Structures are given as C-alpha cells and as structure tokens.
Image (spheres, rainbow, N blue to C red):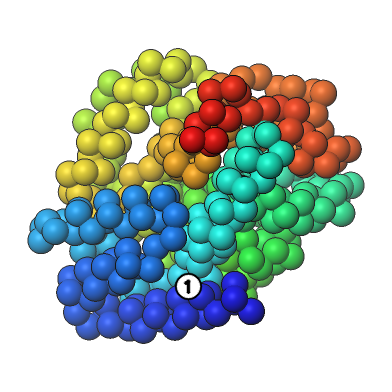
Amino acid sequence: MSAVFPQILIETIVRKAIRDIRDSPKRNTRNLIDMALNFSEGRFQSRFFETAQSMLRDENSAYYRLIPDMAVHVDTEKIINFGINLGYNSCTAGAKKIRALEKKEKFNIPWCISLIISETEYEKHEKEYLRVLEQGKRLGIYTWMLYAPGSIEKSLELARQSPEAAFVIYCSPDQITDAMLDEAEDILNVMFAVRYGEGAEEACRLLRFRNFLYSVFYIYEEADADHIFKDGILEEIEILHPVFTGFLGDESCGEKARKAVYQKIIRLRKEQRYPTVLWDIVNDSRFIDGIISEDACGAVFNGEGYFFHAYGEGLQKEYNIFRQPLAEILKQAFPKTKNCMESLAG
C-alpha cells in the first residue's frame, strides 16, 4: 500500500498540473518543477529537477513552448502513464531496488535494456520475452528500448503485457499508420521514436493528430559529425514537434566523433533554443545509469537473443536471453569492480 499511495498522489498532482499548464504555461510549469523537487527521492531525481529548475529561470527558454504544446496535443493519460512509469517506477523505486541489489549481489544492473525485436523470433519466443520483462522488474528495470525493424505490433504486445514499465519503440516513418495506431490506442505506456528522414513529417503529423506521445531520432555518420548541427537539421525537426530528438552514431562513427557530437548536444541543450529535448541515445543513457548506480553499464539483445554491450563491445554469444535468466547474464557480464565496491561501501 505504501508504494501505491505515492503513485496515486503523483498522478493526481500531475493531472491537475497539466490542466493548469494549458492556462498559464510559464508559472505553472515552474510550480510543477518546484513541487517535484520537494518530493524528489534519490540522487537522479534531485539532480534532474534541480537542472530543470535552473534552466526554467530563463524566461526565453524554448521549453516553455514545448511543455504547453505537449499538454495540449498529447493525450493526458499517455503523458501520465508513461511519465510515472519512467520517472517513478524506473528512476525512483526501480533505481532504489537496483542499488540495493547491486550492493548485495555484487554485479551491475542497467537502468534500461534494449531489445531488437525480430518478428519471426518473437513468434517462437513470446513466452521468453514476457519472462524477461518480469525478470527485469524483479531487478528494478522498468525502462525498455525496443527496436522494431519489422512489425511494431510485436513491440506493442510486450508493452501491453507490462503496463508498469515504460517502452520507447524505435521505428521507421512507414511503420506509423492509422491501422497500427488503432492497435496502440489503449496502450498508455509507450513513446514512439520515429527515424528522421523521408516520410518523418507525415508520420509525426499523424501521431500528433492522434494525440500520441512521440519523439524523433537521427542517425548520423562519421562524416556528419563536424557539421551535423550546421545544416538546419534542428530547425527542420522543430516543426515536427517531437518531445525528444535523439542522436545515434552509425557503425562508421568512432568514439572521438561520438564524443564531439555529445558535447555539442550538451551545449545546445543548455542554450534552450529549440522546443525539443536533445538527447544522445547512448551517452545520455550511460550518464543516467552512472547517476543511479555509479558504475554505468548497458545491455542490448539482438533479434536472436544474443547479448552485446551497449557501449562499444561486440556480440557475446555465450549469453542468450532466450536460454538464460536475465540476472545470470548480467551477473556474468557486469561484475562489480573493486573500485566500485569501495565507492558503494563508502
């Protein structure tokens, strides 16, 4: 009961805040952030809301356009469900469980996991996928990044079966159709991430018209790294009205190029010129994980269930999520280092 009560209280406060923001965006946005900071539990939430509070002191911040736009054009229940699953279940209650288990079991647990969903493999391993989500919740993992190169419907099935978790479904513009959105209409814990490129404008227009929560992501090459933000890309993305704009380097990108892009993203995010939250898909996720548990790790499982590290290491075929428990894979892949254990003990 004690875990349910804070969630009900948060839902009530957020629902009222969304209504108020529509009437008076700046004042009520600041009020919401101030209140969230007062109720914050744990270092991640506190740092996040302190940063938001500091940024919103700028009266000209583009985020004052983003927040009321989202309040008007996204279904309120979708905002509340996805937001609470991400902010409370994952980054508060889940983070607390992750830290406790890491200290006890001596291995690292990522705050989110990425799954590449193969339609044919899903048909054969549906029970295993559902079991993985349950195993993840027992470890404190409530955020899942789903990459759907084939059919989104399988990803929607996973989200429907785990209403306490937050799912980001990465997809191509042609996958956003009225028929698919009809299927997704009553699934409240999903945010679509549409790949920027041909067809993205129409896909985002449809998502906005249907009041879905969505973002866009841009995949860049090594050759793009130096001029990625000089070609008017953010001005073009701005008219799509995404909540987040994610950036991901392709296989041609070296670590130096990725770090250079990340530094530009951090700088532009602080400038608050665009009404979308710029996001480095790899490095910001690693940053969050480092705040939550002080020893960042990231796990990705491909369509055949094999594991690879999210931060640069190759495929490891000795680990397969269809054949081994998730905790056992993470225990072997991410053992605690001596320095990390000394940090936790201190």
Quarter of the image holding residue 319? Answer: top right
Taking depth in this image into account, of 284 and 346 the one nearest to the observer is 346
Estimate the x, y position of residue 90 in percent, counting from the top left: 55, 56
Query: Residue at horizontal 34%, vertical 73%?
Result: 71
Q: On the rendered image, what quadrant is the N terminus found in?
A: bottom right
- Residue 171, can we see it? no
Estimate the x, y position of residue 84 in percent, counting from the top left: 50, 67
Residue under pointer 1:
80
Q: Is residue 30 above or below residue 168?
A: below
Instruction: Check the image and name the residue furthest to the front.
Output: 346
Estimate the x, y position of residue 108 in percent, counting from the top left: 63, 35
**Which amino acid, mark 1?**
Ile
Asked whether, in this view, residue 306 is left or right of residue 9, the answer is right
Taking depth in this image into account, of 53 and 102 the one nearest to the observer is 102
Quarter of the image holding residue 156? Answer: bottom right
Taking depth in this image into account, of 203 and 161 the one nearest to the observer is 161
